[in-house]
Image: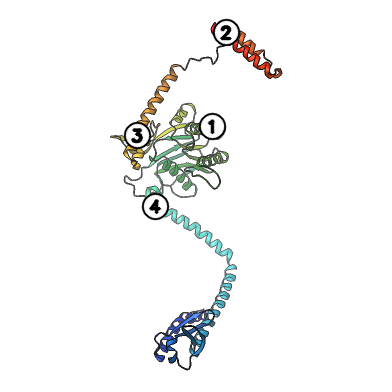
Amino acid sequence: NQEVDELRRITRDGSRWITDLEQQERTRTGIDSLKIKYNQVFGYYFEVTKPNLSRVPEHFVRKQTLANAERFTTEGLRNIEDQITEANLKLKNLENELFQMIRQTVGKETIRIQSLARRLSILDVIVNFSEISAKHRYCFPELHEGGGIHIKEGRHPVIEQLLLPDGFIANDTMMDLEDNRLLLITGPNMAGKSTFLRQTGLIVLLAHIGCFVPASEAKIGLVDRIFTRVGASDNLAGGQSTFMVEMAETARILDASTSQSLILLDEIGRGTSTYDGLSLAWSIAEYIQDRGTLGARTLFATHYHEMTDLENHRRGIKNYTISVKEVKNKIVFLRKIVPGKADRSYGIHVARLAGLPQSVLNRASSILTELEEEDQNTSKHSNSYEHVQLPLLKMDDALLEAIKSLDITTMTPIEAITKLFELQTLANSNDTK
């Protein structure tokens, strides 16, 4: 719009006009301290200090007197001010009119614009899918209506892009609705359990939204939803602890999932005592595995090594672990998922990698040894008596009959105390015999 351009030129050049006028009047009057200023009450004005008032020319019109200076205007300054003010006002009004006109024009084409936006968004997604699939060696996933999820050399699409020292270690995932419904994954912290859970979920998700997947081969059975319980934090504002948040999320998963869902659970039960956490994790695993209650395909990472016994008692549960190599009292994470179970957590080794002081690590090792020896002694003691059952009380027939014959509901307090004394006397006499 030419008029808009002209008005913007005037408002843009106005500051230059003011500067030029100020310089002209300084030269004409010889007053070096003369300045043009502006405020919302008086607009633009010349300001001259008191010592220079004698040199003020006649065409200066006084506007205001201050303690140390006086303010003036001129016809030339008023003209510039009028042009700038008028241009600003006209520009605002004209821009508003043009904006309303654009809104009306665009409004008439809303359906076409939204339709185009939808098509462009789909095209944008497909182009991006194509680019990352070609660039990062993704494979074409085969989707089917069966229960199997077979991923060969699966990778995490984000973590594999990081500059890892040994590169990203790919892993296979073999799940179905029969013998491999729930994969119980044990292994030390930092070994890659959570990454394996996440990459499996992301590969299944990518396959379902029409993208190639980071793997060498993938055959994905359709899932209705993907549920995750990976990582948790407390909700102080809502009055919920970390454990409460974890249990609430798990409850929603058990309530909303079906046998066609994919469930990813990481360290369920870690926010409470060992026995409480183990009991809950064990029970949740049984509930998910059982076809009568759920029977969903699940990856279940845990530090409770006791849960690996489930493989021997429940069909559909298989044990997997993260390969770890121990060299000279140091551990190396091989980050490979293999069948089997972990026999140690390597917590102290991970703490060493994290940089804990050596004195703390040494003390922790000593305490761990003591606890393990105590646990072994307790286990031996309990096993030596496991088939022996001792009665809590030794009681002869006369004493037992005397207690059974009591009618406590009709006895007064005095009668009750008297009868208790008689029973105690009878018991003492039996001990003497």
Distance from Cα at disc 4 to Cα at disc 1: 41 Å
Q: Closer to the N terminus: mark 2 or mark 1?
A: 1
Earlier residue among tags 4 and 1: 4
Helix, strand or loop at label 4? It is: helix
Instruction: Give yes or no for contact between labels 4 and 1 (Cβ–Cβ under 8 Å).
Output: no
Q: CA distance from mark 2 to mark 1?
A: 57 Å
Q: How many marks?
A: 4
Q: Nearer the viewer, residue 276 or 210?
A: 276
Q: Nearer the viewer, mark 2 or mark 4?
A: 2
Sequence-wise, the earlier of marks 3 and 4 is 4
Query: At x 58% / y 75%, what residue is drawn?
Result: 97
- Percent x, y of residue 287: 54, 33
Q: Could you say which quadrant of the image residue 203 lies in?
A: top left
List the residue tagged with mark 1.
290
Query: Which of disc 1 and disc 3 is earlier in sequence?
Result: 1
Q: Quadrant of residue 248?
A: top right
Whole-angstrom CA distance, mark 2 to mark 3, is 55 Å
The answer, for residue 270, to whether it is visible in the render is: yes
Q: Which residue is mark 4?
A: 134
Disc 3 from disc 1: Cα separation:
43 Å
Residue occupying image coordinates x 47% and y 55%? 125
Secondary element at image label 3: helix
* Marks 3 & 1, CB-CB < 8 Å contact: no
Q: Residue furthest right?
A: 410
Residue 429's mark? 2
> Relative to 179, is 34 above or below?
below
Residue 148 position in % (x across, y down): 48, 38
List the residue tagged with mark 3: 363
Verify CB contact (< 8 Å) between mark 2 and mark 4. Answer: no
